[in-house]
Amino acid sequence: MRYYSNVAAASTVANAGGISTGTTNLVLSTSSGLPIQFPFTLRIDPDTANEELVSVTSGAGTVGTPYVVTRAFDGTSAKSHTVGAPVVHSGSAIDFRLPQEHMANVTPGGVHGLPTSSWYPRSYVYKSTDQGYNNDVTLNDDLQLRFTLIANEDYEVAFYVMATGLGGNIKTAWKVPSGTTGLKQVLGPAETQNNRDSALMRTGNHGFNTEIKYGLGSLGLYSGIQERAIVRVGATGGEIVFQHAQATSHADLTTVRTDSYMIVTRISI
């Protein structure tokens, strides 16, 4: 951030003997109207071949308390200036460049002074293809409900699954990278239920790879299952994958349906 004034008086260099290229203390004939906060910009010998911009970082511009300045500011060159050289308060190219850099900055935590956690992304993974099986109690990796997690990061993960089936019902589990910690919260029809609209519900907290069995009420009417967790990834990154199979081997088709989805949000704990 830089500071500006619309009432700054024109001034001159008042250092005894002027200033050399290495001088960082600047005395002015007057500091009337100049900003009282730092930093701000001064032009010495403006509109001449000897022009130089300096950034004022502290001080009062007097003999006892001179301005402390950064020389050769904003791409100009340090030059010697004589006593009485004109000095004006001004903006410079940096005033236009910084907003453009700000708008172009997509680095998490790089803009607005907000912490990196404010810029963590949320990702949605949508299942666009049915995935079904029968006579199958071996967990299958979902072909689409999966996401790559970064090592040593934390995530909020939620699965919203639509499924159909009858005789075989369904069981689920999560595949996670080695060293990942946390517990998943589950919600869905209890295994003994076959009426999706009036069912006892299974709720609880379990390890990620614990197999959870749910009841399904129809080969055509969707039942809803929700599972979510705070997932803390260890030193090994990798995919988190939703897994499913029949709870009981049966000729009826168990299907995880299109429109199921997962939400993954990187968080800071």
Image (spheres, grey):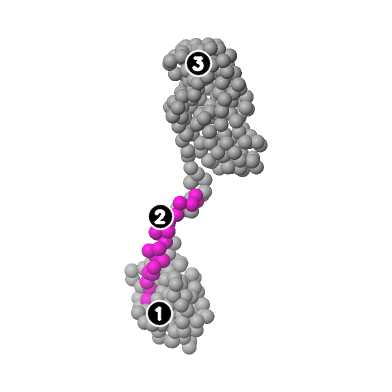
**Relative to 240, 50 lies left or right:** left
Quarter-of-image position of residue 126: top left
Give the distance between the C-alpha atoms of the residues marked 2 and 1, in whole angstroms.
30 Å
Kind of residue sitting beneath label 2: Met
Q: Which residue is mark 3?
A: 253
Name which residue type carries label 1: Glu
At label 3, counting other C-alpha atoms closer than 10 Å, the crowd grade (few under 14, some 14-19, many 20 or more) is many
Residue shown at 52% from the left, 80% from the top? 22
Q: Residue at x 37, y 79 (%)?
A: 46
Q: Nearer the viewer, residue 53 or 241?
A: 241
Residue 104 magenta-highlighted: yes
Residue 255, placed above or below residue 30: above
> For mark 2, what is the residue?
103
Residue pointed to by mark 1: 51
Q: Please name the residue shown 47% across and 38% down the image.
A: 123
Q: Which residues are magenta?
A: 87-109
- Closer to us: 84 or 71: 71
Q: Secondary structure at mark 2?
A: helix
What percent of the width, then of the height, locates residue 156? 53, 35
Give the Cα separation between the discs numbered 2 and 3. 52 Å
Q: Which tag, 3 or 1, sits closer to the chain's start?
A: 1
Assess whether residue 124 is covered by the magenta stretch: no
Q: Earlier in the sequence, mark 2 or mark 3?
A: 2
Farthest-out residue, bottom? 17
Amino acid type, residue under disc 3 in the picture? Leu
